[in-house]
Amino acid sequence: MAADFIIYPHLFCFSYHLKSQENITWSNWYKNNQRFQSLAKPEQPYYEFKGQDWEAIYKQFDFGDTDSLLLFASCLEKQKNQSLDFIKTLKLKLDSIQGSIGKTWLVLGEVKPGQEDAIAKSIASFWDSKAQNSNESNYFLGNKIFSYQINTNEQLLILLAPNSRSMESFAYFYDELSRLFYYYHKIKWSHQQNLIIKKHLQDENFFPLTREIPTIQLAVADFDVLHANFYQLKAALYENILKLDRHTRGIEGLSLQFETLKINLKAYRSRLNRIQSLIQKDKKDKDKQKTDLKLWSNFAENTAQTYQEQIEQDILSLRPGLKVREQHISTLRGIVEASQAERDRNIENLIGAAGLGVGVSSAAAGAWATQDDFKPSQIFLISLGLGLLCFAVLYILLWWVRGQKHKKPKR
């Protein structure tokens, strides 16, 4: 059947990886295919590979904190009909390439008009039989576009051309699309990072329930504030300080992802406008090569905009809870300081009373030591008793006097 064949099939792999994470798959692919490498011309910033029935081009870009790889393979025969299984063969050659931020697969080939839907469905099955087309009819330089989401950070685009001229026009946009897809994946990646951060914050009950103001569970009444549970109170203070740190870091993380998404969304729109402007420059071929990029413009205006609004709303939802926790910590700190002051006063009372008791006991022992009427053991007991009595009286007196000074005035 005609739907089983494609002319001059290409498979592109646009892969994006954080520089902070080692990407072994790129270097491994290069090493494994070195035997196919042909000498590149000095002015060409890429490597060419030629196998028995396939060829490939390997090119890297530097996008700030991200390494970008454009690797695409095609058959050597440009005119002969190829089985769709050849695309599966090309996929196996590139399948080891990974990307921590995201990856876009793009299939390009010439097919007989009217067979595009059937061929696109068959090609998509090589990635995931459950992948669904976006159902949007889009064209890029006369190539009909089919879009499939493979997973959260991997997409598949199938561009099927009615003739070789449409396919050749696509070659002028490799670099432009490499940047457009980078911004696309960085937006998706920022959204995923937001969900990860939000999940951690939800696990610690930082997010409020629906339509509720977030509250911090802190039952001050459960503490014997000035006495027995001083260390329990301090532990609660430290625990809340640690939670405040995690809470604050969570908001900072969300704010960072918000700014990252915002910047990349702006760059995505700018790059898409540039692509559309480059296409419009060729007035002669404007009608012959149909272009309708609603698929990509809708992502910017709907999906990406929704991501941005969600992150902004998450940040706003967290701020009230942060303020409540700060207020509770301030309250706890005041209670701890008051409790510590009370403990210090008790220690001062104890030291003062003990000093007097020891002094009285020593004086009594010295006075009676010259008396023959008392035995040494009796002198020790009498002096000890007088010392303890003076200690108890003075301690109670100091406790009462200082307690009156710190007692709250009656209203």
Image (tube, rainbow, N blue to C red):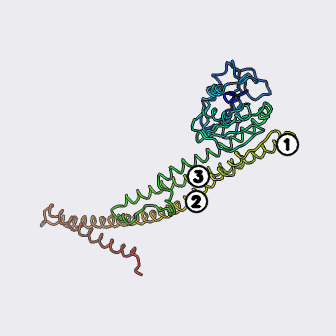
**Exactly how many numbered labels are in the figure?**
3
Vertical comparison of 284 with 215: above or below: above
| Mark 3 crowd level (few <14, some 14–19, many ≥20, 10 Å Cα) | many
Q: Which of the image's four quarters has the N terminus?
A: top right
Residue picked out by circle 1? 281
Residue picked out by circle 3? 254
Residue at mark 1 to residue at mark 2: CA–CA distance:
44 Å
Q: Earlier in the sequence, mark 1 or mark 2?
A: 1
Q: Which of the image's four quarters has the C terminus?
A: bottom left
Residue picked out by circle 2? 316
Residue at mark 1 to residue at mark 3: CA–CA distance:
40 Å
Q: Residue at x 58, y 59 (%)?
A: 316
| Mark 1 crowd level (few <14, some 14–19, many ≥20, 10 Å Cα) | few
Q: Nearer the viewer, residue 353 or 192?
A: 192
Question: Which type of secondary structure does the marked residue at label 1 adopt?
Answer: helix
* Residue 235, image x, y percentages: 40, 56
